[in-house]
Image (cartoon, grey):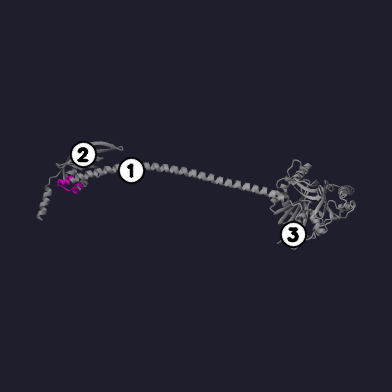
Amino acid sequence: MLNKYLGIDISDDFIRYVYLKSSPFSNTILKAGKAKIDFDILSPRALCQSIKSLIKEEQVKPTRIFVSISRKDTVIHQLTLPKLTKREFETVVTSEIEKIPAFHRQEYDYIYRKYPLGRDKVRVILAAIRRDVLDAVLREIHRTGIPFEHVELTPLNFRDVTNKIDHVYDCDACVVVSDRQTYLSIYDSHQYKNFYIMPAGLNQFQHTVSQEQIKMIANDWASQLKRALKAYLLDNRTIRINKIWLVWDKEVAPNLDQYLADAFDNPVEILDVRKIPKIKTTENYPLNPIYATALSPISGYIHKIKPQYNLQHFFSRFQMTRYALKAGAMAALIIAFFGIFFNEGNHWLNAHTKQYVLQSRAAEGKTRFLKGEAQELYAQHHEYDAIRQRFLAQATYVQQLNRVSWAQVFAVVANELPEELALKSFRFNEEGRATIKGQALKMESIAEMIRRIEDSAILDKAKFDFLKEGEVADQKILNFGILAKLKDEEPRETDTDEQEEN
């Protein structure tokens, strides 16, 4: 599988980068360069946009990014301490860091290692970085969307790079010239012996005009380093420096290696990345040793070197913070979702409850209305039933008199009843008199009823019993009573004689 790695070194004034193509058989540096830092490193999205612009301009597509930091708000410091407990070491280390002006009343992250120094003493090499700077770098690199799991402080792990080149684990020194400071480290085999930081870097060469000025500044710079190295060698007379490795920006100070070689008795060797095993370069690669600062973390990753100063615990805190923020955001989202869900559910339930209450009340009102109508219907039913029973009783009575059948009586009543007249009751007594009561809208209907009775087959001698006016629903109603008599039985006897003759 082909991987493409982007290594960047974030200093005070520049972002230096190398772009490397990696395969199981070779690792080739395709591009290297630098971009000016003209923004505050703490500004949100500033570093992210700068890296994205660099990637776009150079037309590179990294699959992983590696970061080293060499800024004045980082510190690498050396202490000589007696043997202490872990808690005592922590107390001494933090107090030493807080003495540095840049870290006074600032939150910071730090890492340290102890090296034995005689029977009762230890040498402590510590590194610290302001937490706001570290968090800003980690956050902005993460925003680029490129996989990112490696960060280190320049030049803590250069010992591993030079050892890969030389394969001779004698005592060496390494000088790394950053933008605003110079690091001098002395190491023997796998142990750092001394660390010295000089507050002067490439920036003092950038604004010089004449060669005389450059020569004066370079000689002064080399003399300070020589004094620091000489002081260490006087305290450690058994140590001999094999060589001095030099890493600096060749474009800014072209002959700095010569000034350093003139000041020191030891040989000075430029750190050439082409000598690092498994690393190749293309023809257009700028032969500038400063890009080793950006290549250092990639080299350690390719060679599977376990760094002495592993800064992964910085990542752990950053990742835990991110996960905590993500978990908090997710919890807030879930709470908001369920809050909205329950709020909508409660709103829906209240609305439907109100609707059901209104429907229930309407149903109750309708039920009461129907019950009232039903009572009226029952009353009418009872009234009609009572009339029917009276009709049947009268018809039965007539039948008992053996004059006419009750069916015949009903037929006559139905025949003789005008359409605009309502019959309420009729009654027969033992004398054969019939009393008929009813209602009519017009007097003519009552008169028509009397005439029809006169012409009926079983009744005659019809006359008024009473006549009253009434009013129902603003309508004038005539209540009447008619008296009549059953006709004699002669027609019935004639019919019987005819039947006997037949």
**Magenta stretch in the rendered image:** 397-410
Sequence-wise, the earlier of marks 1 and 2 is 1
Q: Position of residue 424 (x, y in %)?
A: 24, 42
Mark 3 Cα within 10 Å, few/some/many (few <14, many 20+)? some
Q: Residue at x 60, y 47 (%)?
A: 333
Which corner quadrant of the image does residue 453 belong to?
Answer: top left
Q: Which residue is mark 2?
A: 481
Q: Residue at x 51, y 44 (%)?
A: 346
Q: Residue at x 43, y 44 (%)?
A: 359
The answer to whether the residue labelled 3 contacts the one labelled 1, judged by CB atoms less than 8 Å apart, is no
Q: Secondary structure at mark 1?
A: helix
| Horizontal arrangement in the rendering, residue 292 relative to residue 355 (left or right) | right
The answer to whether the residue labelled 3 contacts the one labelled 2, judged by CB atoms less than 8 Å apart, is no
Label 3 vs label 1: CA separation? Answer: 96 Å
| Horizontal arrangement in the rendering, residue 281 relative to residue 263 (left or right) | left
Q: Nearer the viewer, mark 1 or mark 2?
A: 1
Q: Secondary structure at mark 3?
A: strand
Q: Which residue is mark 3?
A: 21
Residue 409 in the magenta stretch? The answer is yes
Taking the view exactly as shown, the residue that stands out farthest to the bottom is 25
Q: Amino acid at mark 2?
A: Gly
Q: Position of residue 173 (x, y in %)?
A: 84, 53
Label 3 vs label 2: CA separation? Answer: 125 Å
Taking the view exactly as shown, the residue that stands out farthest to the front is 119
Q: Which residue is mark 1?
A: 374
Sequence-wise, the earlier of marks 3 and 1 is 3
Q: Position of residue 24 (x, y in %)?
A: 73, 62
Mark 2 Cα within 10 Å, few/some/many (few <14, many 20+)? many
- The foreground one among 435 and 448 is 435
